[in-house]
Amino acid sequence: MTTFWILALCSTLGYTLNSLLMLPFIRKHDAMSVGIYRNLSLGISFLPVTYYLVPREDWSSLLGVWHWILISAAIAVIVVWCEFEGLKRVPVGIFATLSTGIRIALFMVWGVLFFGEYLSVKQLIGITVLVLGMGWLGFNMKKKIFNHLLPSPWYVQVALLLTTSVFMSIAFVFLVKASRAANPLLVGHVWEFMIGVCSLMAIMIRGSFGYGKLEGIPLKTFGKILLAASPTIVGTGCYALASTQGPLAILGAIGTIGIGIQALVAVFYFHEKLNSSQWLGIAVSVVGILMLKLAS
């Protein structure tokens, strides 16, 4: 179980670092276009990992799981679009907190239905405390992705929130199924690249109807995106590996620690000050992490 926790924490750290490094590009360029370039670049940057760490005989294992990877990638395209649209309309702290809470609740359900992963009462309490702590912190975060929020009816905001949460949980179920049936590093590599391919197809179809085309960027900018996205190799690689060693719901709960990491980066790197409510959220989360670790 120690290996599972190390992999899960490394995954969280990789994804969090990727989010921080990609933020300037998302603010400067079309968000969907940036997402496409990010995932396509991962097809390149992931290559050394799979070439040196994945045994040649494992490559054939993709034949039995390619449909799960493709379904997961296609669903992820919907998630990315809904998430960006949601963040244009709902404060990031509220949107991220609510979507994370819904997703983890669904992970508990999917874990039982698809993988037979029943959690103990202590594990459920630990997950609840951790999510509540990070949720409280998220609600009190002031970070903005877009400078101005678009006015929209409440039911549009709720629809985007629910679509993001539900579809993301389903996408990860298919990713976990593939990771447990084939080499997880290879699955993670192909999955990230296929998200880029599916997103590119989606934006081309959207562009043909006059709803916005892929934004062109200089090769130098693509290189910068490739470097900024490279922590995702750790994020997705470790996530895929961890999913073969522990319950889906606990893996998802550990992922919420990313909110706390972003808050600490804001304190120690950007010299921002946290208020008492934010520190309370971190303290409660630490208690939840300890409870979950002791129960696992």
Image (cartoon, grey):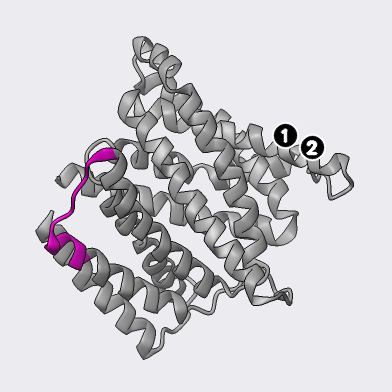
Image marks 2 and 1: residues in contact by CB distance under 8 Å: yes
Task: Assess whether residue 125 is covered by the magenta stretch.
Answer: yes
Relative image position of residue 166 (x, y in whole percent): 48, 54
Q: Quadrant of the N terminus?
A: top left
Check disc 2 and report its element: helix, strand or loop.
helix
- Which residue position holds label 1? 201
Q: Residue at x 75, y 55 (%)?
A: 29
Relative image position of residue 270 (x, y in whole percent): 50, 73
User: Extreme left residue here?
Assistant: 294
Relative image position of residue 295 (x, y in whole percent): 11, 58
Relative image position of residue 274 (x, y in whole percent): 41, 84
Is residue 95 among what the camera can see? yes
Q: Quadrant of residue 279?
A: bottom left
**Amino acid type, residue under disc 1 in the picture:** Met
**Amino acid type, residue under disc 2 in the picture:** Met
CA–CA distance in space, label 2 to label 1: 5 Å
Q: Is the residue 157 above or below the residue 105 in the image?
A: below
- Which residue position holds label 2? 204
Q: Residue at x 60, y 64 (%)?
A: 159
Check disc 1 and report its element: helix, strand or loop.
helix
The part of the chain drawn in magenta is 115-126
Q: Residue at x 37, y 87 (%)?
A: 277
